[in-house]
Image: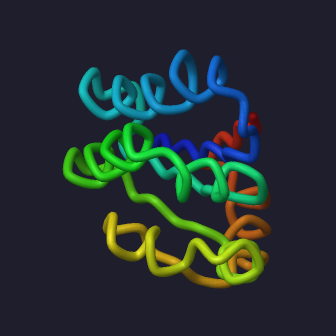
Amino acid sequence: MSKVLVVWKSNNDIDIHNFVIPYCYNAVMHEWFDEVELLIWGASQEKVMEDTVIQQRVANLVKNNVTVYACKMCSDNVGASEVLKGLGVNVRYTGDLLSDRLKDKDYEVITI
């Protein structure tokens, strides 16, 4: 089984609109991987909180079977937890999740 976790920490619009969101969406739609996960981490959470277009695109990823997580420590620190939860994002502490994915030979981990 092939799986990918995209760790999204960039708040750069070019990265967000031309890689992070379209890559995750297309990875599911074209079945490039059996499972596609997105981890919203750090500065990207603040960007999601502030930008309604990005919020809609994240909600669309959730709707289209991308498993989306957000780091609870980060989201609490920037005040984004409720916004992220409202989009269907699984807000949780993610140190263990990331570590498990890094050690799992079935996972590819991409960071942007």
Colour style of the rendered protein structure: rainbow
Q: Nearer the viewer, residue 56 or 23?
A: 56
Q: Is residue 40 left or right of residue 82?
A: right
The residue furthest left is: 63
Q: Quadrant of residue 18?
A: top right
Residue at left 30%, top 52%?
Answer: 59
Q: Position of residue 38 (x, y in %)?
A: 53, 50
Q: Nearer the viewer, residue 35 or 48?
A: 48
Quadrant in the picture for the C terminus: top right
Residue 31 to residue 51: above or below: above
Residue 89 to residue 43: above or below: below
Q: How many marks?
A: 0
Q: Position of residue 19 (x, y in %)?
A: 57, 21
Q: Position of residue 70 (x, y in %)?
A: 58, 67
Residue 67 to residue 74: above or below: above
Residue at left 39%, top 28%?
Answer: 27
Q: Is residue 9 left or right of residue 29?
A: right
Residue at left 63%, top 25%?
Answer: 13
Q: Nearer the viewer, residue 88 or 81?
A: 81
Q: Is residue 85 left or right of residue 97?
A: left
Quadrant in the picture for the N terminus: top left
Residue 74 to residue 42: above or below: below
Q: Position of residue 107 (x, y in %)?
A: 62, 47
Residue at left 72%, top 72%?
Answer: 78
